[in-house]
Amino acid sequence: MSRRLLTGYLLAAALVAAAPRLFDAYQVDVLNSVGLYVLLALSLNLILGDAGLFNMGHAAFYAVGAYVAAVLNTRLGVPILWAMPVSGLLAAAFGLLVARPVVHLRGDYLLVVTIGLGEIVRIALVNDVLGLTGGANGIFGIARPVIFGQKIRRPEEFLYLIWGFVALTVFLFHRLEQSRFGRALTYLREDPVAAEGSGIDTARYRLMAFALGAAWAGMTGAIYAAKMTIISPESFSFWESVLVFLMVILGGSGSIPGVMLGAAIVVLMPEVFRDLATARMLVFGLVMMVMMVVRPQGLLPWRAPRFRRADAARAEASR
Amino acid sequence: MSALLELRQVTKIFGGLTAVDDVGFDVEAGQVVGLIGPNGAGKTTTFNLITGNHRPTRGTIRFDGQPITALLTNRIVRLGVARTFQNIRLFQQLTALENVLAGRHCRTSAGLLAALLRSPGQRREERAAVERSLAELAFVGLEGRALELARNLPYGDQRRLEIARALAAEPRLLILDEPAGGMNEQETDQLVGLIGRIRERGVTVLLIEHDMSLVMRACDRIVVLEYGKKIAEGTPEAIQRDPRVIEAYLGTEAT
């Protein structure tokens, strides 16, 4: 990892760690919201940024994770953090199931299909699917998470839970980026025909990208359920999918620090312009438009170089 | 003893167009075989049928005795058939090394979990893959260019990088689609040498080429297509004298 990137991460970590002293409870809660969207953007980035698969129904996986955790917690009394891996697994399974028949579709067609998927999931939740989801009212009374006997309740407590998971995610996803698996996704994005022709099972990697992205969105959903204690279908609307899509494209598709920045900006900008009242969404929209014209590659399109001079020299020497 | 690659009555129809019409030929192990013919004769379509990019409408293709007609491209590569493309298809935004590593993919196995845990086995495999890829780059004459982006390489180097990527997959049959396309005379001479060294490695080569000086120098046998049909097959000397081939290339005088 480059020194500059590491410095950036450490500064961000320091800011988050000091946030409860610097900011009021409302602002800390906004930071929690940023953290959740960072997780969603990173998970979508695997699908959209790394593998190049246009998915505008990401909220569906987020919803599956949140509802699985909520149902397990309220019906069976499973502690919410124990439910989190189950949320991830079931969201991944759901991702595999729905992506299987459509994943071979080209960019724009896949986009339309995933929009449909997102809507189907939302409407199914509204209609109280399986009699478990509580219809339009959703599920309430989700228990607070407990870590080592410590109940997580206040915003600053959630801050550490959410951003701790962000840190773990960033660490793991950078490892993924620098691996055979990560390279396969890159080849797939750059040129699927050449990737297949080089011996890469492109169908399999498309599905893996979907499954992994869905799993992470699902786990994020579980944290969201724990934080809100109430979840309802309106939290997983089409607009959520659009926002997360925007974060990835705006920040820099395929770049881990880029999509994190994208998530922060998309969440924070309406907060910063709060004084403009209803005009703030206008400003927000305008900034988006200008951004895409002036900087179509995203704010921070930086990707970690996979190999450096030293790596090549070392390998050359041992050859 | 059957041939390494066998095509039997292979036909491909696109809509109303018969691009490949009842073509059959063998490629014996250890040989360099050229596939020639005028533009639109069905050469690249034949390659696409062999590598699984298209399915034949009729006929069978066997590699090492095994039918590969219904297999996916990546399975065929894994069996030992690697290719380059007529209109270079490198990963332009990636380095030369990363491009060659794409070829190593099917000969390595580290999965998702190994990547996340970065196990000793995964590290060892990565190191070996990088070393092998650098060796392939050196083999095609691109040593020292490993970290350059593919799109920044000159045209001839990009062609050779594609060959390195294909070789990294450890093929037994290497399929080259117009490898000398866009190369100058000197580069073409080097390419003839490279094809010779590939053959010395025990890799069988099947190539499409318009540059007749290359075909005549590099190939043991030549198959000629015209309008999707095979019109001749034989040694370079025999092909040069074949009246049907001369007719196909030069046309007949109107009488």
Image: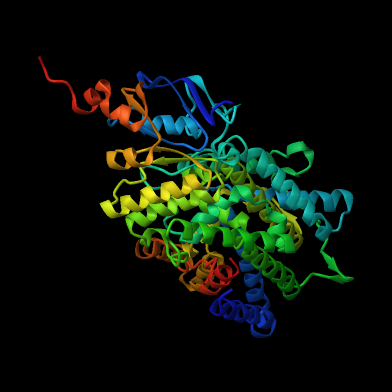
Q: Nearer the viewer, residue B248 or B196?
A: B196
Give the total of numbered labels: 0
- The answer to whether residue A307 is above or below residue B13 is below
Question: For residue A297, what is the image quadrant?
Answer: bottom left
Judge left or right: residue A261 versus residue B89. Answer: right
Residue A49 % position (x, y) = 52, 56
For the N terminus of chain A, the quadrant is bottom right
Residue B159 % position (x, y) = 38, 51
Residue A233 % position (x, y) = 66, 48
**Which residue is rendered at x = 50% and y = 69% of the image?**
A269
Q: Is residue A54 visible?
A: no
- The answer to whether residue A287 is above or below residue B159 is below
Q: Nearer the viewer, residue A172 or B206?
A: B206
Q: Is residue B145 visible?
A: yes
For the C terminus of chain A, the quadrant is bottom right
Residue B136 % position (x, y) = 51, 56
**Which residue is rendered at x = 35% and y = 53% of the image?**
B190
**Which residue is rendered at x = 44% and y = 33% of the image?**
B48
Judge left or right: residue A136 versus residue B80. Answer: right
Judge left or right: residue B251 versus residue B130. Answer: left
Residue that protrudes farthest toward the front in the picture: B237
